[in-house]
Image: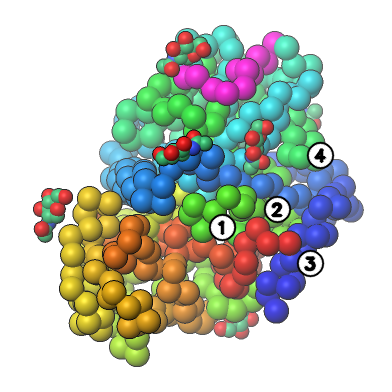
Amino acid sequence: MASSLYSFLLALSIVYIFVAPTHSTSRTALNHRHEAKVTGFQIMLEHVDSGKNLTKFQLLERAIERGSRRLQRLEAMLNGPSGVETSVYAGDGEYLMNLSIGTPAQPFSAIMDTGSDLIWTQCQPCTQCFNQSTPIFNPQGSSSFSTLPCSSQLCQALSSPTCSNNFCQYTYGYGDGSETQGSMGTETLTFGSVSIPNITFGCGENNQGFGQGNGAGLVGMGRGPLSLPSQLDVTKFSYCMTPIGSSTPSNLLLGSLANSVTAGSPNTTLIQSSQIPTFYYITLNGLSVGSTRLPIDPSAFALNSNNGTGGIIIDSGTTLTYFVNNAYQSVRQEFISQINLPVVNGSSSGFDLCFQTPSDPSNLQIPTFVMHFDGGDLELPSENYFISPSNGLICLAMGSSSQGMSIFGNIQQQNMLVVYDTGNSVVSFASAQCGAS
Ligand SMILES: *[C@@H]1O[C@H](CO)[C@@H](O)[C@H](O)[C@H]1NC(C)=O
Ligand SMILES: *[C@@H]1O[C@H](CO)[C@@H](O)[C@H](O)[C@H]1NC(C)=O
Ligand SMILES: *[C@@H]1O[C@H](CO)[C@@H](O)[C@H](O)[C@H]1NC(C)=O
Ligand SMILES: *[C@@H]1O[C@H](CO)[C@@H](O)[C@H](O)[C@H]1NC(C)=O
Ligand SMILES: *[C@@H]1O[C@H](CO)[C@@H](O)[C@H](O)[C@H]1NC(C)=O
Ligand SMILES: *[C@@H]1O[C@H](CO)[C@@H](O)[C@H](O)[C@H]1NC(C)=O
Ligand SMILES: *[C@@H]1O[C@H](CO)[C@@H](O)[C@H](O)[C@H]1NC(C)=O
């Protein structure tokens, strides 16, 4: 049902429904400028390692390695001492999108990141730029570029803007030494055939510590005012991620296209933290392995609103799911006791727990895994939590976090329609064949 609805929407979206009536009682004055904007479009997403001729083992190893670095960055955002010059942001991710900037439109690819807000791309003149596959954007060659005045609300939305000759300057640091710096501007961004004027972005002239081949910038999809959904004033978006190693692209629907998706149930209440308003915290009450409800106190996943610790976020850019250590150990023990197979060391591929599979695969019984959300139980398909990185081995695609925050990662979300509805403060899930039409 959900998947046929989804196919229908995909077909619909090819016709690109856009420029619809304004719903102009917008939430904030900030967004009045986009009244006549596009109300919905589709963006194809490609895995960062797609097309690199890597084995499944290599793909997983690389994705898990990036994911564990991301976990550290996300956790560092919570611990960042206030008063430091730059804040720390997640700043990478697993999915790339194609878009264009300026007039005439210059194509580039960028990471989609649900863990940060700023939209940025490398800009000339570069003090320091990394190699990108498309020409580096030159704002002087674009008729639609404007600088952002320091008094603008979106300049003030940066955590530590500086002002130089009334040009708003930004610095975004990513915790591991990578950093982008430059001037804030406004530009026309084009997604497919849909152009949206006056989007505020960072024109990165000094970009250090970024790996190459992973796009020419980043599109923040977080909950803060600078993110793409916030600037478009859309309160709903959805994505459907194909499994790692699939050659079929994933996709992202924004605005009215996502509005017509009613995934409904199971769902989970979105909570916004005043300490890190960017993150999508969800409401998880417990976990079951097989028929066993694990003895985990629900407070293990609760956000402490007084100091911003704890909680569980949903993220597109973290590969594995990480639970706080007590909860993870409980999951791990229960799988070991229910799966009657030898435990083997899987740490070379980045997994914590692996089993040696029986020679007759029909003897392999994988217990169910259920996430008990406040809006219903999400039973994951087994391939979303047990993965075979190589023959003879199956590994649990989960791990333990160390700083008290848990993360619902992207392997667990594959082949699911995930609808982020910030207007109703809910995220809902429906199983789907992503990328199928
Ligand atoms: C983005 O553009 C590049 C170059 O044209 C193309 O190879 C790639 O498949 C595109 N990716 C997506 C997700 O559309
Ligand atoms: C892909 O990798 C395999 C093994 O590493 C190699 O044999 C093959 O030639 C590669 N194919 C391409 C198109 O590069
Ligand atoms: C970047 O590209 C230039 C020109 O194509 C090349 O000479 C240089 O080696 C590249 N740098 C890196 C670090 O790959
Ligand atoms: C662009 O948006 C800003 C608010 O951020 C607004 O002041 C300005 O008038 C807008 N410009 C155009 C051309 O719409
Ligand atoms: C969330 O799920 C519950 C059932 O658990 C359902 O009653 C409710 O309508 C759903 N909410 C939304 C916004 O879909
Ligand atoms: C944050 O608050 C929670 C609950 O009030 C408390 O248990 C925890 O120790 C606090 N953590 C820090 C780092 O202050
Ligand atoms: C697993 O293997 C890694 C090396 O691949 C080693 O460092 C680690 O100690 C091993 N763990 C156990 C529990 O044997």
Q: Residue 25 versus residue 3: which sits nearer the camera?
A: 3
Does mark 4 have its CB less than 8 Å from ligand 1?
no
From the image, tell me which residue sits under label 3.
8
In the rendered image, is residue 396 in sight?
no
Residue 87 spot, x, y in % from top left: 38, 35
- Amino acid type of the residue tagged 1 in the rendering: Thr
Whichever of callouts 2 and 4 sits on the residue coming sooner in the sequence is 4
Per the model, the C-alpha gap separating discs 1 and 4 is 24 Å
From the image, tell me which residue sits under label 4.
193
Left or right placement of residue 364 versus residue 259 in this view: left
Q: Please, what secondary structure does the residue beneath circle 3 have? A: helix
The region drawn magenta spans: 130-140
Which colour scheme appears in the figure? Answer: rainbow
Q: Please, what secondary structure does the residue beneath circle 4 have? A: loop
**Is the residue under label 1 in contact with that under label 3 (CB below 8 Å)?**
no
Q: Residue at x 68, y 72 (%)?
A: 3
Per the model, the C-alpha gap separating discs 3 and 2 is 16 Å
- Amino acid type of the residue tagged 4 in the rendering: Ser
**Is the residue under label 4 in contact with that under label 1 (CB below 8 Å)?**
no
Whether 123 is among the magenta residues is no
Whichever of callouts 1 and 4 sits on the residue coming sooner in the sequence is 4
Residue 115 spot, x, y in % from top left: 47, 47
Left or right placement of residue 232 versus residue 430 in this view: right
From the image, tell me which residue sits under label 1.
242
Per the model, the C-alpha gap separating discs 3 and 4 is 20 Å
Pick the quarter of the image with the N terminus: bottom right
Q: Is residue 126 above or below residue 270?
A: above
> Which callout, 3 or 2, points to the residue nearer the camera?
3
Q: Residue 354 versus residue 75: which sits nearer the camera?
A: 354
Going by the picture, which residue comes out furthest to the bottom? 291
Q: Please, what secondary structure does the residue beneath circle 1 have? A: loop
